[in-house]
Image: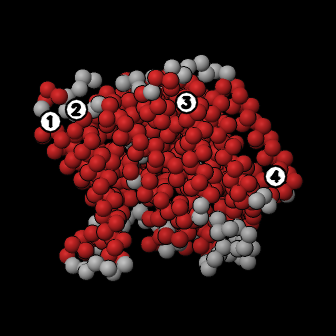
Amino acid sequence: MTFWLGILLAVYVLLMVGLGLYAGSRVNNEEDYLVAGRRLPLWLAWGTLLATWFGAATVLGASEAARAEGVRGTILDPFASGLALIVAGLFFARRVWEMQLLTVGDLFAQKYGRKTELVSSMVQALGYLPWIAAQYLALAAVLTHFFQIDHTTAIFGAALFVTFLTMIGGMWSVTLTDTVQICVVLVSLVLLGVKFAATVGEGSVAGGISMTWEQTPPELRTLLPEAGLVALLGWSTTWLNGVFGNIPGQDLMQRIFASRSGSVASRACLLAGCVYILFGLLPVGMGLASRQLWPDELPQGSDGHVILALAELFLSPPGICLLVVTVMAIVVSTCTSAMLSPAALLSHNLLNRISWFHERKLLTNRLSVGFVAITSLPLALMTEEILELLESALAVGLVALLVPFVAGVFLRPRGELPGLLSIGCGSLFWMGQQIAVSLLSSETVPTGTLATILTTVPPELTGLLASIAGYLIGQWITPETERPRS
């Protein structure tokens, strides 16, 4: 199987490299590189949106979360994340497209000023680095498992491949490769789902195990929270983080900016969100069913991944090869998107302030991609515990950027102060509570009412409320005459 997997993987790499080179020939200026010249039709805008969202966390993570915690464990992915795309399509896509922006940093520059642009771009760009490192590790794990490649060598190889695809053609390259890859992903998932349903839906598998939906315990089949205030707060925060934490993200907005029109951007978001949730139900269902197949633990050789365990049970060797390449494809599509987003902020909103870089915009964009790739490598080369920072990094969108972003789209901010206070207060209260909770868990600080509050209220909710307060205070103390002209 390793031989045929190598052949299929080589074909995939050659196809992606060819698409990347073709995309590079279409790039003539910064607008082409960052937003594909604002020319994406619906099918390409939809494809790159879905591919960016539909990553390894959906296929592998959702099935494992469903097995461990039931449907409730999959709120963040696919339900809340899919709903984020629908919310963006309904309320944000047309408005932000009409602003004719290249990055989210441009919105902060227009609505607040240059200082807020600088701070927001730095905060958001840093948050992408752990995400990119996670994709390096995912690709390296596949190469190490099936081809016995040294782990460090595999990380460097994965980084080099995705850096080339991103650097050569920017948004055009990412869009074309994303669209092809998401088609492969969806076809593979349908094949595995159909094979799985036909075998065990109402029949039996090895050992005579018969499985139906009714056999899954009711507590594992609901999205509703468990009883209790702590559970309710955690459940609500997960929905908030998943739906609204993604809204100000550069990866989402960059695809909206790249669409051919505001209506195309809106429809692409709505279509991608619905398809995302629909296809996301496949790994969720497989994760639940795996509890009946393997009540205690997954079989050896699956590395703890439900999808790989099911593939080895139900698919032929060619089918397993296709699934492995599919997993690699979704990781690559996620990684290229994650890499282009901070590179765009770095080149357009930070380095563009320096005259040498300003005069060489296209070169600066490509150099920024390389810089992002290099700076994320140390995170992947460290112990995998660094990936625990991933969830915290993604929460930055909710606690620091959501409020000033939404206010910039729908309201009339009064200059720099509302934006800076909103970002600063949200970040400080969020980080401060995390530090305080860490100290409390070490029992170095006496417990009491304050300690109970700190450990009950999620830090993301505290940060969001602080961000709202910071914006309102900034609006209140800033005279109307200082509002920048947008």
Mark 4 and mark 3: Cα distance apart in space: 35 Å
Give the residue at mark 3: 365
Q: Position of residue 222 (x, y in %)?
A: 43, 65
Q: Position of residue 417 (x, y in %)?
A: 22, 38
Q: Is residue 448 above or below residue 180?
A: below
Q: Kindly identify the residue that appears in the image at 19 percent across and 32 percent down.
A: 414
Q: Position of residue 269 (x, y in %)?
A: 46, 37
Q: Quadrant of the N terminus?
A: bottom right
Give the residue at mark 4: 5
Mark 2 and mark 3: Cα distance apart in space: 29 Å
Mark 1 and mark 2: Cα distance apart in space: 7 Å
Q: Kindly identify the residue that appears in the image at 53 percent across and 61 percent down.
A: 386
Q: Are marks 4 and 3 in contact (CB under 8 Å)?
A: no
Q: Which badge, 4 or 1, comes first in the chain's sequence?
A: 4
Give the residue at mark 1: 478
Looking at the rendered structure, the secondary structure element under dot 4 is helix
Q: Is residue 128 above or below residue 209?
A: above
- In this view of the protein, can residue 207 be seen by the observer? yes
Q: Position of residue 113 (x, y in %)?
A: 29, 30
**How many other residues sit within 10 Å of disc 3, few (<14), some (14-19) or many (≥20)?**
many
Residue 437 falls in image quadrant: bottom left
Mark 4 and mark 2: Cα distance apart in space: 57 Å
